[in-house]
Each structure stands twice: as C-alpha cells, then as structure tokens.
Image (cartoon, rainbow, N blue to C red):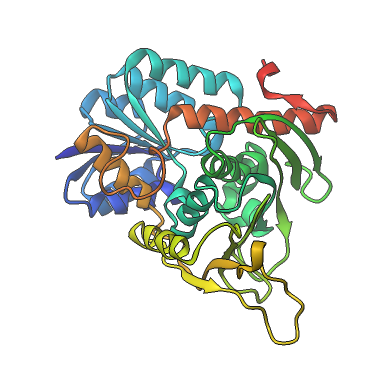
Amino acid sequence: MLNAGIVGAGILGCAHAENLRDHPDVTVRGIADIRADAAQRLASQVGAEAYTGVTHMLQHRPLDLLVVATPDPYHREPTLAAIDAGVPNILQEKPLATNLADARAIYEAVERSGTRLFVNYANRTAPMDIATAYTIREGLLGQVVYGEVRLDDHISVPTALWGARSRDWAEGSSTAHFLLSHVIDLLRWYLHPAEIKQVYAVKQQTVLGYTPDLYDAILEFDSGARVRVKAEWIRHMDELVEFYLSFSGAEGTLIYNKLPGFGASASWRANLASRLTIADLVDHQQQLSTAGAHTRAVIDRGAPGTQRSPGAEGTLPLALESYGHSTGKPMALADYVIDAILTDTLTPDSWKGPGALPTHEDGFKQTLAVMGIVESAELDRVVRLDQLS
C-alpha cells in the first residue's frame, strides 16, 4: 500500500485526490494547500489530514508518493521539499517549470537524489494519441517532414476558470506553458528519437493585456521535420478546448481531430505508405487494438466520380481510421505511475503506449522548448535550444 500526499487543492488536486482515493493500492494521507479551507474541504472528502504547507505535511506524514498539483509557476518549492524529505516518488503536473532556473533545479535534484519523478502528460494515454505515436514511429507515413498542431482555449479559461484567482493565475502562466507544454511533449513522444533543435515564434498580447493572447511557432527537429504549433486562449467558441493535429510524411498523411469544434466530429485517419500490403495493414490494426486504439482498416478505392489514382505499381491506397473516439480517463497516467512504482519500472505491463512513462528528463526538455518559444517571440529571431542559458 502506497501512502500518498497531494499539494494543491485546486481543480487538478481534487481530481488526483478522487482518483487516488479510489485506487486499491493507495491511501491518501495528507492534503496541503496555503488555503486552509480548501485543504480541509478536500481532505475531509478523501479521509486525509489537512495541512497549510507541504513542509508541515512532509514532517508529519512519511509518504511513498507526493502529487504536486500547484499552479504552473509554483512547482519548484514543493517538489524540492519532497526530494529533500526523501520522498521516493513524485507525480508532478505539467509543465515541469515555467522558467529554466526552476526546471534545472528540479532536474538536478532528481538526478542527485535518485527520487523518481513523473510528469503528468496525460495526453499520452489517449487511445488515438497512442495510435499517432505508433503510426509515426513505425514509419507508416514514411519520414515525417511537416506537421501542424493547434490547441486553443475558450476565453473563459484565463478570465474565469479559477474564479476570482483567474487573472492572477493566467498572468503567472501563458498559452506557452499551459497549452504548448502538452503539445511539445506529444511531439517529442510521437517523433522519438528526434529532438527539437531550434524554434521561431511570435506572440500577440492585445486582448487580455496581462498575459499573451497566443503563441505561434515553427519548431525544427534534428530529423529535418518542421512543425507549426499555435495556442491561443481568447477564442469565443462553442467548446472549452479545440485540439487539431496533422502530419505529412514522405509517403503518407495523418489527420487527427482530437477535440474538434464548430460542428466537426472527433476523427483520426492515417493514409499509409503505398509499400504496405493488406497483410501489413491488418497486422498494424491488430497491434493498435491490443494497445486500446481501435481503428478501421480501409482499402481506399476512391469515391465515385473522383480521379484518385492507385498507389505505387497499381496498388490501392491503404488507411486506418477512427471516429468518435474517447480522449481517455483524465487521470489515467496516474494509474500507470502507481503500477510503475509498485513494479519498479518505467514500463509497467499495464502501459500499452510506445516508450517509457514521462519523467523529469521529458519535463526538462519540454520546458526548454517552451522557453525557446517564449524567448524567440520576445527577441523576434530564431532560437537554438542548445544556446539557451
């Protein structure tokens, strides 16, 4: 049985507390928040003790796992306190940090201590994100040369989502930290082992004033791929979030309406390399199904009246597609983290996605890329990530 504590009793802290309360291998022992009423309210819901500071909690409650769910700029203090107290496992909300000094401090403390730190990049658990990573990593599109990702929020997110604290919260973060942290991690995961080499970005800050309205950037990977990423939170739209991704490979294309808006449907389609056979198609479909990503195999003959041509040597284009898919359980990664802790591995048997669960190294590289975007937008020039100080 793992003894767990949570610092931060906001939206995500509450979600973590409820998830851990219901896990058969976890007991929630403590909830810490500088707001005593919020800490007490959540603690009473999950049968834990309430504390107004993480240090006080760590002094009174030996923990096997600490969840850090404080606002974006305030991850450093509780994470370092937990490391200093000898907590062996930490699950931290993304981003790792909102500046490089904090990110390096956390990274170096983890490296020195041997504490295992996971970052909650929850999008990695969604079935069609697993399918996207698999499709790209298996070379089913050929070499990916270009991508486009848009992740946008309704304007109510920076103005009202956290109630009276919304402006202060948004002013301490931005779409680069709050939204592009998700995007950067997904891109690094999809395109592994490629890494982001340099970025060029612009920002706009005319609507909200106290925080940028949006960031728009081109990321260049050392594989040669270029990906445009854009995140804004000033949209007046029907949905709270819109999320669209597409990738062009030398031999195929993938389009993913993850969280669609304006009447579009959740959908995913990968038009695959023409060198693949029908047997290959079925095999990849089965591999994805085993990982929980259920797709339909398509032999695309083209719609009546179209001039679509067969693939190489007269073969018919092959595709995989999915409609109406789920984004997955909100705290699914936490469950995999618990399995990883209990079995002492970064790849527990329950985890069906490619690669290991995200750690402090992923968090640091994500923060590095986001800070490159922020600096590029400020300086209006290309920024190489290996030259960031």
- Asked if residue 98 can be seen in this view, the reply is no
Relative to residue 367, is residue 279 depicted above or below?
Answer: below
Relative to residue 186, is residue 240 depicted above or below?
Answer: below
Residue 94 image offset from top left, x and y in percent: 50, 39
- Give 146 or 51, whichever is nearer the viewer: 146
Q: Quadrant of residue 175?
A: top right
- Give 88 or 42, whichever is nearer the viewer: 88
Position of the C terminus, as image quadrant, is top right
- Direction front: furthest residue: 313
Residue 178 image offset from top left, x and y in percent: 59, 43
Direction from residue 206 to residue 363 in the image, left or right: left
- Direction top: furthest residue: 112
Direction from residue 278 to residue 302 in the image, left or right: right
Q: Residue at x 25, y 23 (%)?
A: 59
- Give 31 or 265, whichever is nearer the viewer: 265
Q: Residue at x 41, y 56 (%)?
A: 330
Q: Quadrant of residue 378?
A: top right
Q: Residue at x 34, y 50 (%)?
A: 352
Q: Residue at x 70, y 35 (%)?
A: 224
Residue 146 image offset from top left, x and y in percent: 71, 47
Relative to residue 361, is residue 7 depicted above or below?
Answer: below
Residue 198 image offset from top left, x and y in percent: 72, 29
Position of the N terminus, as image quadrant, is top left
- Asked if residue 93 can be seen in this view, the reply is yes
Relative to residue 45, is residue 380 depicted above or below?
Answer: above
Direction from residue 384 to residue 8 in the image, left or right: left
